[in-house]
Amino acid sequence: MGTPFISLLEPTPLPWERALPPSEQPHAASLPRTFLDAMTVRSQVFVQEQNIPQANEFDADDPRCAHWVIYASVNQTVSPAVTDAATGAVLRPRQSETQSVPIGTVRLVPFPHPPHPLRGGVYVDGELVSSSSSPAPEDTTTATANGTTQPTFTPDRPTTFHDGIEPYVKLGRLAVTKEFRGRGIAGQLVRTAVDWMRTHPSYFDPSPAERGFEQLGMEHGGTLPRWNGLLCCHAQEDAVKVWEKCGFQIDPEMGTWMEEGIPHFGMFLRVEVEPEAKGV
């Protein structure tokens, strides 16, 4: 394997058919290559390995996310060697070529977010289907022009590392293909996304002119939500150690819950943001 390289896709419209795998998308020609590759990795890991329904893998957050895909240069056989059956002499040597293959991905979801998952809750396709704790929080989404919904800026329940009000960004859909695990690929993806956000702290800060004061959850002339270095992830149980190596800490008050039949833990990381260059 050659030196991996990483591609970034900033938020973009994504005409995606949720029930279809990446190889069968009817609008594939109009989709960014990076996103197709991200979904190929996610399909291999979450759908084929973890048996999550294909239709639940793409969601309304994907078009507003930043996506990273890491690639490896892999030497693959194009045609096998041809030998003489009688003598074993090579009549035509094996032909191979080096191709860039997507091997991992992660996404960054900007604020706002739905309420923190309930401790002990069971979620399917992002929806709470059962809970043994407090009642489900009220719906805090608004419809957009294209018929999808987006969460609004409303107070959340406080946890150990989140006061319920401060804007945070969320990393998720972290996936590495099976044959490339154990090589630090997941950590490389997470650190790349964290460093990008740390050096672009105002990238997702909202504008009342674009979103409107009502959706921002504020009165006209109030204080705009600004990101100040807080990151969250909803980590699968088996991936907690990966996130911990990147500096994330389990939030005890957030508790655990089930997503698509898999135990998840809420984790947070705070970083020091870098001032952005003026006029860039």
Image: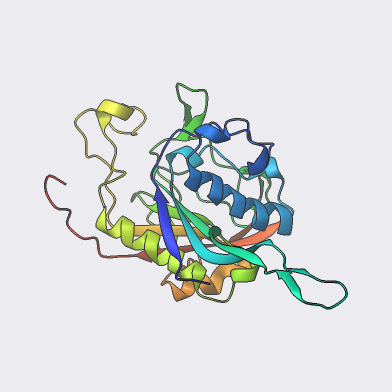
Q: Position of residue 269 (x, y in %)?
A: 39, 65
Is 48 situated above or below 128?
below
Q: Position of residue 76 (x, y in %)?
A: 62, 64
Q: What residue appears at the point 55 percent right and 50 percent down from the top-left corner? A: 37
Q: What residue appears at the point 37 percent right and 30 percent down from the top-left corner? A: 215
Pick out the residue farthest to the left: 278
Along the line of sight, the residue nearer the viewer: 68 or 51: 68
Is 269 situated above or below 108?
below
Report the side of 109 relative to 259 (left or right): left
Report the side of 270 relative to 239 (left or right): left
The total number of labels drawn is 0
Q: Position of residue 237 (x, y in %)?
A: 62, 67
Q: What residue appears at the point 82 percent right and 71 percent down from the top-left corner? A: 84
Along the line of sight, the residue nearer the viewer: 172 or 185: 185
Specify the color scheme. Answer: rainbow
Q: Position of residue 6 (x, y in %)?
A: 42, 59
Along the line of sight, the residue nearer the viewer: 163 or 224: 224
Q: What residue appears at the point 36 percent right and 61 percent down from the top-left corner? A: 194
Pick out the residue farthest to the right: 86
Is any part of residue 29 visible from this angle? Answer: yes
Is 28 situated above or below 3?
above
Give the image quarter of residue 205. top left
Give the image quarter of residue 94. bottom right
Is any part of residue 219 visible from this angle? Answer: no
